[in-house]
Image (cartoon, rainbow, N blue to C red):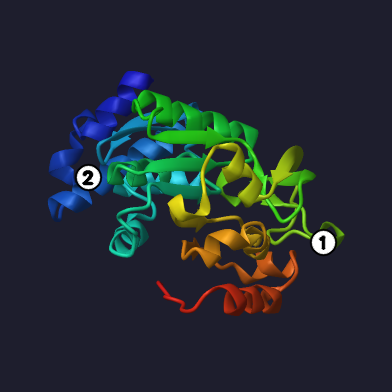
Amino acid sequence: MHKLIRWIERGSQLGLRSLLPGPQEARVLARRQIALFFLRHFRKEMTFRRNGFTWTGSPFCLVSESIFLSGHYQDAFIELLLKYLNAERTVIVNIGAHIGDVALPFSRTGKRVVAIEPNPKTFARLQKNVRQNNLDERIECLQFAISDKEGLAQLVVYPDAANSELLGEESRVGYGFGAQSMQVQVKTVRLDGLLKSRGITPDQVALVWSDTQGLEAQVIESAPDLWRNGTLLWVEIWPRGLDCHGGADHFVELCKRHFRSVLRAD
């Protein structure tokens, strides 16, 4: 079956190259969609090469699916941020690193990337993607959840691992538990303490990329010295997630307190 899947992706099996009309990009996408369909029936994990990197991920994960089909996940935002990075600062912090969809592209800047991911299974794939691309010296992988308090917390894991989220106030979650969700205990740390333990000072950090499913306010509160030193913060805003962790108003107030300007990227 492995050989069959590879042939289908190449468009040789069943003569797909001649059957699919349209530009070359459309034919490539169609072949990849067919390959992904078969992978989901026969594989729990897939390894493939896209955009100069070798990737390992789940065929049922939105992030892995996007990279498999299009070659990237959020590269447009990465490209946007590159022109704002302080060239003299040497560190990029990626919170909620998942399988490395942000960390690996940012490694091309030559800066040190600290990739932080709490989900144990996803963290293992992050490590694998770093290793199989020979990026161990550029990307440091750390298995934590970033919060304003240190301790232990429950991470709710869904079938699509990209949607994992920390259990919120009064056991609330943004996605809803669902029959296939499960919980794992993870360690929470403050970002300022974690960076200090790795020998990183606030004036070394060019960017913090935070994709924490509603925990963005806690990320801001966990490292005030970073923002005082002019570190850029990129966040993905999910109102339902924010509501589970103090609310959107609290997040907005922290943004007003710690940042001079906001750039919206849709």
Q: Quadrant of residue 135?
A: top left
Give the left or right position of residue 170, taking residue 97 as reference. Answer: right
| Quarter of the image where the N terminus is located | top left
Please state which amino acid type lies under the numbered disc 1. Glu
Residue 234 placement (x, y as % from top left):
47, 63
* Viewer can see residue 158: no
Q: Residue at x 58, y 41 (%)?
A: 117
Residue 241 versus residue 38 in the image, above or below: below
Residue 31 placement (x, y as % from top left):
27, 41
| Quarter of the image where the C terminus is located | bottom left
Say which residue label 2 marks: 28
In front of the other: 16 or 26 = 26
Give the left or right position of residue 15, taking residue 234 as reference. Answer: left
Residue 213 placement (x, y as % from top left):
62, 58
Say which residue label 1 marks: 169
Please state which amino acid type lies under the numbered disc 2. Val
